[in-house]
Amino acid sequence: MEDKLTIDVTRINPEGETIEGEVGCVDLDEEFVKPFGGVRYRLDAQVFGTELLVRGHLEQDFDLVCSRCGKDFDDTVEVDDYTFSCQIDEHNPEVDLTEDVRESIILTLSTYPVCSERCQGVEQTAEMPADERWGALDGLRVGDAEPKGT
Ligand SMILES: [Zn+2]
């Protein structure tokens, strides 16, 4: 897998062109956030006068740890409306998008990932005021899962 995403503006079709691939550029080394595979990209690149305009879709798979319950889960971070533009330097026609793509993925990554919107976590009772209705629901669930003879 490539570790750089570069576009040579002299080779872009004047009508615009779609570039697709995978670039391994999200090199986070966090205990609770581990990328796997690379950033998959599908981008439309076009040159307008002296400007390069790129827009499209990015996605990266992660191994995450739920901030509520502490379980490992997989998630895909997607950037639907990625855009990049820069002035073209005719002496240096190769534009490097690597760092910008990496930042877009990291900015989209949630600071507090949760395995599910409905995840109840493990410390709910400590954080939330006691509410008998929840207690009743818990009792019901336990009863369903572990039927006990009466
Ligand atoms: Zn969870």
Image (tube, grey):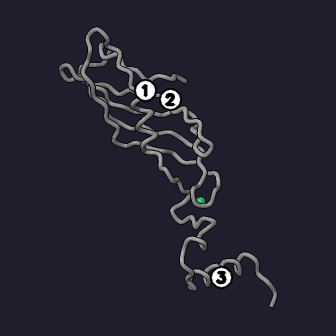
Question: Which sits earlier in the primary sequence, circle 1 or circle 3?
Answer: 1
From the viewer's side, name the closer residue of 106 and 44.
106
Residue placed farthest to the top in the image?
91
Q: Label 1: which residue?
A: 98
Residue 140's spot in the image, x, y percent?
Answer: 65, 82
Quadrant of the frame with the N terminus: top right
Quadrant of the frame with the C terminus: bottom right
Q: What secondary structure is marked by label 1?
A: helix
Q: Residue at x 62, y 60 (%)?
A: 69
Residue 122's spot in the image, x, y percent?
Answer: 63, 66
Which label sits in the foreground, 3 or 2? 2
Q: Label 3: which residue?
A: 140
| Marks 1 & 3, CB-CB < 8 Å contact | no
Q: CA distance from mark 2 to mark 1?
A: 7 Å
Question: Which sits earlier in the primary sequence, circle 2 or circle 1?
Answer: 2
Q: Amino acid at mark 3?
A: Leu
Q: What secondary structure is marked by label 3?
A: helix
Q: What secondary structure is marked by label 2?
A: loop
**Residues packed near mark 2 inside 10 Å, few (<14), some (14 to 19) or many (20 plus):** many
Q: Amino acid at mark 1?
A: Thr
Q: Label 2: which residue?
A: 25
**Residues packed near mark 1 inside 10 Å, few (<14), some (14 to 19) or many (20 plus):** some
Q: Height in image: 55 above or below 145?
A: above
| Marks 3 & 2, CB-CB < 8 Å contact | no
Q: Height in image: 14 above or below 142?
A: above
Q: Height in image: 88 above or below 73?
A: above
Residue 128's spot in the image, x, y percent?
Answer: 54, 74
| Marks 2 & 1, CB-CB < 8 Å contact | yes
